Image (tube, rainbow, N blue to C red):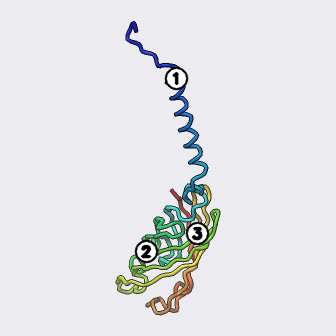
Amino acid sequence: MPGGVTYAAPSVISARREQRRRLVVLVLFAAGVLPRSAHAQMSISDLPARPSLYVEMFGNALVFCCSLNLEVPASDHLLVRVGTAAELFAERPYRTESVLMTMNGLIGTHGHYLELGAGLMRTTASDVATQAWHVRPTVDVGFRTYSHGTIHRITLTPPLPPFDGSRAGRPWSAARFGVSIGRTF
């Protein structure tokens, strides 16, 4: 042909169109019929375990104010929490510091969850006089909500008498309530 342009025969063009149509039908069929994973079926608002960064007052870090915590999901209903805390408003001889790591399980749906957690804490709160670091177990039971990228938590940390140390008998060696607010990402 003049100019080097070639044309496909009408039968070749219709065969290509038919192949594309079949491919599109096959893809649509596979997308609608084949099973999908739970993550693909859930919206992000239904996932209980979300990465979060939050500040907690009181709580299981054994300080009045404040702990900074990072939570990372280990599964859909299990979080790993790492936090650090220091009493910001206490004089140096009475300032306690803590570092904690817990596993928190979540039970619930649609942004409202019961939280059950346990882990270890390294703290000076058990021995204020010498500021020595001690490792002790910690547990918490609480309630959390996720709403518009914000996390709210209220927790109860029961006392563990064998580990209360020199603070035994003081008001803060009793059950501690924690209040948290932060962001999910």
Under circle 1, the secondary element is helix
Q: CA distance from mark 2 to mark 1?
A: 69 Å
How far apart marks 1 and 3 lie (CA) works out to 67 Å
Label 3: which secondary element: strand
Outermost residue to the top:
2
Instruction: Report helix, strand or loop for mark 2.
Output: strand
| Amino acid at circle 3 | Arg
For residue 120, the mark is none
Residue drawn at point x = 43 percent, y = 80 percent: 120
Q: Is residue 104 left or right of residue 1?
A: right
Q: Which of marks 2 and 3 precedes in the sequence?
A: 2
Nearer the observer, disc 2 or disc 1? 1
Disc 2, disc 1: CB below 8 Å?
A: no
**Mark earlier in primary sequence (1, 3):** 1
Residue under label 3: 153
Q: Tell me if residue 138 comes above or below residue 54 in the rendering.
A: below
List x then y, in percent, for residue 15.
Answer: 52, 28
Local crowd size for mark 1, using a 10 Å CA cut-off: few (<14), some (14–19), many (≥20)? few
Query: Residue 135: where, in percent of width, then height?
Result: 39, 83
Q: Nearer the viewer, residue 22 or 49?
A: 22
* Of the image marks 2 and 1, the number of the one nearer the N terminus: 1
Residue picked out by circle 2: 101
**Amino acid type shown at disc 1:** Ser
Q: Which residue is mark 1?
A: 11
x 57%, y 56%: residue: 35
The residue lying at 46 percent from left, 19 percent from top is 8
